[in-house]
Image (cartoon, rainbow, N blue to C red):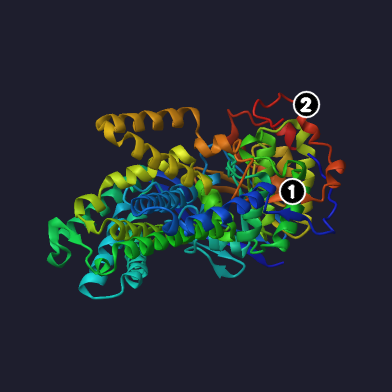
Amino acid sequence: MTTAHATVTQHVKVKRATKSSWAGLGIAIPVLLVLAAAPYLVERGTQQQLVTLFSLIVLATMWNLLAGYGGMVSVGQQAYVGIGAYGLVYLADTIGLDPFVAVPLAVVIAGLLSIPISFLAFRLVGGYFAIGTWVIAEVVKQITMQIDALGAGSGLSLTSLTELSPGRRIAYVYWLSLIAVVLAVGVTYFVMRSRLGLGFTAIRDDSVAASSLGVRVTRSKRFVFVISAMGCALAGGMIAANTLRITPESIYSVNLSAFMIFMVVIGGLGSIEGPIVGAIVFFGLQQWLSDLGTWYLVIIGVLAIVITLFLPRGIWGLISGNGRIRLFPVGYRLVSPLERFALHPPSPDHADGEPDPKEPT
Amino acid sequence: MAPILEVAGLSKRFGKVITAEDVSFTVEEGSALGIVGPNGAGKSTLLSLITGVLPADAGAIVFDGKDITKISPGARSELGIARSFQIPRPFVDMTVFENVYVGAAFGGDSHGQAGYDTTAEALEITGLLPLSDVPAGQLRLLDRKRLELARALATSPRLILLDEIAGGLTEKELPPLIEMIKGLRDSGVTVIWIEHIVHALLAVVDELMCLAFGKVLALGDPQEVMRSPEVIEVYLGSTFDMGEAS
């Protein structure tokens, strides 16, 4: 073992951004500007499709935050999608709030409801947690179906938005959704760059070791759980505002969780870019293959299996060269003191002993 | 010197298996306590009880005058208790630097530039600085053990618990490790060290405790403990070599 006890006198330098991240920003800003102008450029149908894509990106990003960074595999996020959607319709149509006020309020309600739910769900781990969240989502659905004010089993239509002219309505919903995507990805990025995010990544890799190093595991997990619930509720609001009609069977469908898992897995778990790529690919597949009926699901299933087997880091892992390119860098790279490397010839004990096959070259 | 750790009547059982029964001892601040005992004696369990990964069934743990029996592992780490795991538990998808920075940023409560400096220092002491940007999952056993130590050091601990940190190392790799642990102890960090390689342990520790079937069999001067008939009997039939102890 090297035992040079030289104290580090000068400060070390740590780099958090990379060249590719600046390039990413250079691409992201023009793309966002073009997207913001879309209501003036493309027809209503395309805008509505883009809202669907945006809601998928939000959902995938939130599921990734939960599973890819928080290590919690939930199959019950549709509970919050439903709460967000029903919250919007109820607050706007029955209470009479402005729909664009009702959405953030529904998001807050979902966040508040997810706190007591987390105490229940966190009693379970691993596969039990997954099933438990699914059961909780079913319970939320059944409760919704018991409430006549929420349309019971037949669902609700959002009427307050139809007071606007269709052109305006669709454009407003589009802009709201664009803001939602930027918010969901932005919040994830800033959380993951913070000390909190460092803790989440540690928890995902080994929660026992993380707790021994001072990470408050349960508190951190609860925070992610609530953020993810709020993000899913936001997506629920987007879906309701886009389709103007919700039913318990569709908005609380476990398929939503299956889609989230699919998008994150094919895009790349545990990166911010992966879920975005996954959502775009999934959206494309939905558009092109929807005429094929059942075959569409077969193709999607086969694709998921192939990617899990051959590309464990998903499509983004392939594009980025296993994380070499990072548009949203969250890591820490030591850049100096480089001269110290000269003092320590790369670990002398790496020369003897059996070579490790996984040794980086 | 005042005791930094007082363990009183600590008990833990898993069903019918007793892994700690009425374990009591104190450790003086700045001293080193070695723990030996046959496999299954409850040594690692004892460390898990002290760090809070496992809740105790009965008894009390007092750290620096504060009862910590009921508080979370994270809170204990912030108070200054750090631990290395017998089987290394690296954060495999994080780099070596990030692994160690977790310890600095949470247990050591020093983030940003101060945390980076603490991290670099822990990496330097353990010789891992050249591997800073390597994903921890790619490390070999020796480096994983160093990483365990570096992460624990980065929390700026007052008490460090080492679980068979020397296990699996070659004779050549031992002396620098022993020097490093001695250096830690001499800098004022209290050390509790579980080890099967008794001669490595005896080179460092001030006191030795022998555990068997979850009970304290002997506790006191290291040489006397190793000579006590009960301890010898527990080790009979095992590969323990008294010659190594001197």
Dot 1: chain letter: B
**Amino acid type of the residue tagged 2 in the rendering:** Asp
Residue A49 makes an appearance in the image? yes
**Residue B192 appears anywhere in the view:** no
Q: Would residue A176 appear left or right of B233 to someone viewing this image?
A: left
Chain hosting mark 2:
A
Question: Element at badge 2?
Answer: loop
Residue projecting furthest to the top: A354
Q: In the image, what residue occupies the spot 73% across and 54% down? A: A14
Q: In the rendered image, which quarter contains the C terminus of chain B?
A: top right
Looking at the picture, tell me which residue is in the foreground, A250 or A30. A30
Which residue is labeled 2 in the image?
A352
Nearest to the observer: residue B75 or residue A57: A57
Q: In which quarter of the image is residue A153?
A: bottom left
Question: Disc 1 marks which residue?
Answer: B123
Q: Position of residue A171 (x, y in %)?
A: 38, 62
Q: Quadrant of the N terminus of chain B?
A: bottom right
The residue that appears at 55% across and 34% down in the rendered structure is A318
Q: Residue B152 location, x and y as percent?
A: 65, 52
The residue drawn where x is 44% and y is 48% is: A67
- The answer to which of A326 and A309 lies nearer the viewer is A326
Question: x, y (%) of residue B165?
Answer: 66, 41
**Left or right relative to A261: residue A335:** right
Camera-nearest residue between A201 and B162: A201
At x 59% / y 39%, what residue is drawn?
A320
